[in-house]
């Protein structure tokens, strides 16, 4: 008999029965309770892609969903139909600049998680969101610096 078949430290006979009877909501509540005790009451803000997070901060700045894959960086900005016609988008290698957003004559800047290319960015409206797709910059500029003695 192999040692990993023992399911130590669990009771071997009752463990599989107990697993089959578990309610997913009870497990989720237990995990939320433990996470709150360990990380504090506002732990969800430290884990941005866990569950539904609030889309607005208290000072009316919109919090976009920003995430990256191996080739792209995506930004998802919530909008209202009346806002769409005036919004202008610009970016640098490290920053997204949205003009007339969230209100007219305002400029909002968001840091990107990775450097992106200057060209090849695409933006489109999807329902009540603007989805912006950046191509990640593959090569990074490396400089060697001499150390003087």
Image (cartoon, rainbow, N blue to C red):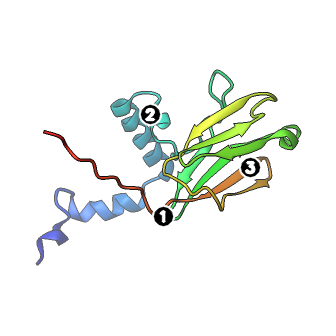
Residue 62 visible in the picture:
no
Of 10 and 77, nearer the camera is 77
Task: Spot the residue most to the top.
Answer: 59
Q: Nearer the viewer, mark 3 or mark 2?
A: 3
Residue 110 visible in the picture:
yes
Of 117 and 8, nearer the camera is 117
Structural distance between the alpha carbons of marks 1 and 2: 27 Å
| Residue found 51% across the figure and 61% down from its top | 69
Instruction: Please tell me the numbered disc located at residue 105.
Output: none
Structural distance between the alpha carbons of marks 3 and 2: 27 Å
Percent position of residue 42, x then y = 47, 29
Question: Secondary structure under badge 2?
Answer: helix
Name the residue beneath numbered marker 2: 43
Instruction: Please tell me the numbered disc located at residue 130.
Output: 3
| Residue found 59% across the figure and 46% down from its top | 92
Percent position of residue 87, x then y = 80, 41
Mark 3: few, some, or many residues within 10 Å (few <14, many ≥20)?
Answer: some
Q: Quadrant of residue 117?
A: bottom right
For marks 3 and 2, the one nearer the N-term is 2
Name the residue beneath numbered marker 1: 70
Task: Spot the residue most to the front.
Answer: 149
Q: Quadrant of residue 32?
A: top left
Q: Is residue 69 above or below residue 66?
A: below
Is 48 left, or right, of 76 in this rendering? left
For marks 1 and 3, the one nearer the N-term is 1
For marks 1 and 2, the one nearer the N-term is 2
Q: Quadrant of the N terminus?
A: bottom left
Of 18 and 117, nearer the camera is 117
| Residue found 65% across the figure and 21% down from its top | 59
- Residues tagged 1 and 3 counted as in contact (Cβ below 8 A): no
Question: Secondary structure under badge 3?
Answer: strand
């Amino acid at each position: 008999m192999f040692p990993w078949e023992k399911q130590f430290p669990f009771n071997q006979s009752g463990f599989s029965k107990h697993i089959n009877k578990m309610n997913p909501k009870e497990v989720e509540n237990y995990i939320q309770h433990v996470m709150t005790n360990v990380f504090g009451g506002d732990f969800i803000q430290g884990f941005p892609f866990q569950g539904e997070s609030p889309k607005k901060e208290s000072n009316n700045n919109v919090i976009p969903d920003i995430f990256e894959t191996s080739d792209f960086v995506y930004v998802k900005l919530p909008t209202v139909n009346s806002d769409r016609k005036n919004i202008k988008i610009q970016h640098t290698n490290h920053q997204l600049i949205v003009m007339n957003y969230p209100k007219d004559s305002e400029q909002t800047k968001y840091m990107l998680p990775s450097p992106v290319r200057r060209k090849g960015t695409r933006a489109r409206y999807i329902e009540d969101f603007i989805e912006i797709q950046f191509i990640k910059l593959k090569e990074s500029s490396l400089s060697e610096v001499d150390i003087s003695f």
